[in-house]
Image (tube, rainbow, N blue to C red):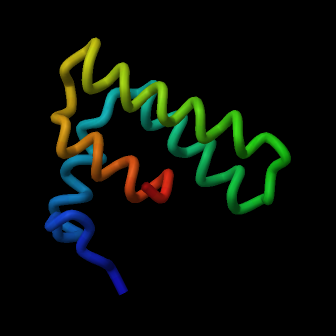
Amino acid sequence: MDEIIMGYTPEQQKIIEAKLPKYLKKDIDALVEGEKNNSHLLDCLYDEVQGSINIAQINDNVITEREADFLRRKYLGW
């Protein structure tokens, strides 16, 4: 079952994630894969995703603060 996160429907979540910059998508994919494989590098993968979210929001202005918070909640468990 798809869940609503921070008021975003599954369809809205797909739209947000489709527009992510390549570096952030790559880091999210690596984290998801690391979690799936129980990687011993999970702490590093979490840090990479957090850093990429911050860059996308603050430096590159390609995601909003709310979208950044959504990604943190979905992938980092905040």
Residue 43 or residue 61, whichever sits in front: 43
Which residue is farthest right? 40
Residue beneath the point at 79% across and 59% down: 38
Residue 16 or residue 45, whichever sits in front: 45
Please indicate whether residue 21 sits to the left or right of residue 52 in the image. Answer: left
Residue beneath the point at 37% across and 26% down: 54
Q: In the figure, 23 relative to 14: above or below?
A: above
Please indicate whether residue 31 sits to the left or right of residue 28 in the image. Answer: right
Residue 18 or residue 63, whichever sits in front: 63
Please indicate whether residue 28 sits to the left or right of residue 1 in the image. Answer: right
Residue beneath the point at 44% across and 27% down: 52
Q: Where does residue 23 sit, x and y in percent of width and height?
A: 46, 25
Q: In which quarter of the image is the N terminus?
A: bottom left
Q: Where does residue 2 sit, x and y in percent of width and height?
A: 32, 79
Q: In the figure, 61 relative to 47: above or below?
A: above
Place residue 3 in its image quadrant.
Answer: bottom left
Total marks in image? 0
Which residue is farthest top? 59
Q: Where does residue 56 sit, x and y in percent of width and height?
A: 31, 24
Q: In the figure, 74 relative to 40: above or below?
A: below
Please indicate whether residue 42 sits to the left or right of residue 75 in the image. Answer: right
Residue beneath the point at 38% across and 32% down: 53
Q: Where does residue 19 sit, x and y in percent of width and height?
A: 24, 38
Which residue is farthest bottom? 1
Place residue 30 in its image quadrant.
Answer: top right
Q: In which quarter of the image is the C terminus?
A: bottom left
